Image (tube, rainbow, N blue to C red):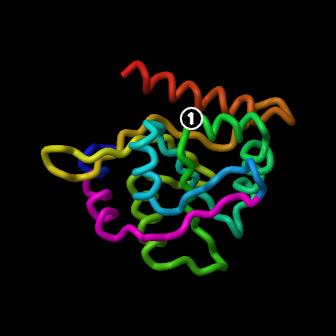
Amino acid sequence: MTRSIFILSLFVLFFTTPSCAQHSAGNKGELTWHTDLMKAQALSKASKKPIFAFFTGSDWCGWCHKLQRDVFVKPPFIKWAKDKVILLELDFPRQKQLPQELVQQNQSLQQAFQVQGYPTVWLFFMNEDSATKQMIINPLGSLGYPSGSEPGKEEVKFLNDANGYLAKAKTK
């Protein structure tokens, strides 16, 4: 992916970003998943935590549901996510209708990251270029379902892989 693709995609995003509400998992101590990229970006900038973008098909993707069951609801992941990242859900449902602004935002990010399958997770920072005033994505790495992991311990492999990307980001 070239920097110019990111800049072009983000230019489109910047002017079509929805003011969509965030949603949370519901129970106390659960995670908050944002749907608005600019809200996630503001939180990322303030906290200096990268954005954890989860590309999902919430009403049709079996592997997305499996990733949520096997990783996202486990206590080690919940603790890690609260400490290390800002969560962003980018949904591509087939049955339910999303607001058009949210559809445009999600499709722009799907194109910027060249997502071809689900689930896909990208870790990234997004900053404004001070000279051009355009938003630029600085990708750290991508993840999917942690295949090859020990059954029942999928979150261990997933978090090890994610922490590897975060460690590389700190050395840059």
73 sits to left or right of 124: right
- In the picture as drawn, the residue positioned furthest to the front comes out as 28
Q: Residue at x 53, y 50 (%)?
A: 53
Q: Is residue 20 magenta?
A: yes
> Of the residues shown, which amino acid type is indicated by label 1?
Lys
Q: Is residue 10 magenta?
A: yes
Q: Residue at x 38, y 54 (%)?
A: 112
Q: Is residue 113 visible?
A: no
The relative height of residue 85 versus residue 25 in the rendered view (above or below) is above
Q: Position of residue 148 (x, y in %)?
A: 75, 32
Q: Is residue 65 visible?
A: yes
Which quadrant, please, contains the C terminus?
A: top left
Q: Residue at x 63, y 54 (%)?
A: 32
Which quadrant, please, contains the N terminus?
A: top left
Q: Position of residue 139 (x, y in %)?
A: 41, 39
Q: Position of residue 103 (x, y in %)?
A: 48, 72
- In the picture as drawn, the residue positioned furthest to the left comes out as 131
Residue 74: quarter of image: top right
92 sits to left or right of 140: right
Label 1: which residue? Answer: 84
Please provide the residue range marked out in magenta. Answer: 7-26
User: How many numbered callouts?
Assistant: 1
The relative height of residue 147 versus residue 67 in the rendered view (above or below) is above
- Neighbor class of circle 1 (other Cα within 10 Å; few <14, some 14-19, many 20+) is some
Residue 17: quarter of image: bottom left
